[in-house]
Amino acid sequence: MDELVKLVSQKTGISEQQAKAAVETVLNFLKQKLPAPIAGQIDGLLKGGAQGDDLLKGLGNLLGK
């Protein structure tokens, strides 16, 4: 998640503290809106685990790809 926070901070020009709050807000929103099996894999994706591949496949299936 740190990498994502730094990227948001760099791209938007906001502080890392503000970027962290923004990233956490978006991630929590996604976890609430996505189907449970996919939402549960978001943390794994951010940690760089193998679950990230499963999440991307699941999103592809959800979007009809």
Image (tube, helix red, strand yellow):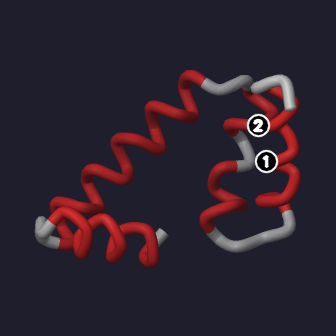
- Kind of residue indicated by mark 2: Leu
Relative to residue 30, is residue 14 drawn left or right? Answer: left
Percent from the top left, x then y, of residue 30? 53, 34
Question: For the residue labelled by badge 2, is the local secondary structure a helix, a strand or a loop?
Answer: helix
- The circle drawn on residue 55 is 1
Vertical order, 60 against 24 (above or below): above
* Residue in the image at 61% along x and 64% along y: 46
Q: Name the residue under label 2.
A: 59
Percent from the top left, x then y, of residue 9? 23, 70
Disc 2 crowd rating (10 Å Cα; few below 14, some 14-19, many 20+) is some
Percent from the top left, x then y, of residue 65? 86, 32
Disc 1 crowd rating (10 Å Cα; few below 14, some 14-19, many 20+) is some
- Kind of residue indicated by mark 1: Leu
Vertical order, 54 against 50 (above or below): above
* Residue in the image at 84% along x and 38% along y: 58
Look at the numbered discs 1 and 2 and tell me whether their residues touch, using CB distance below 8 Å. Answer: yes
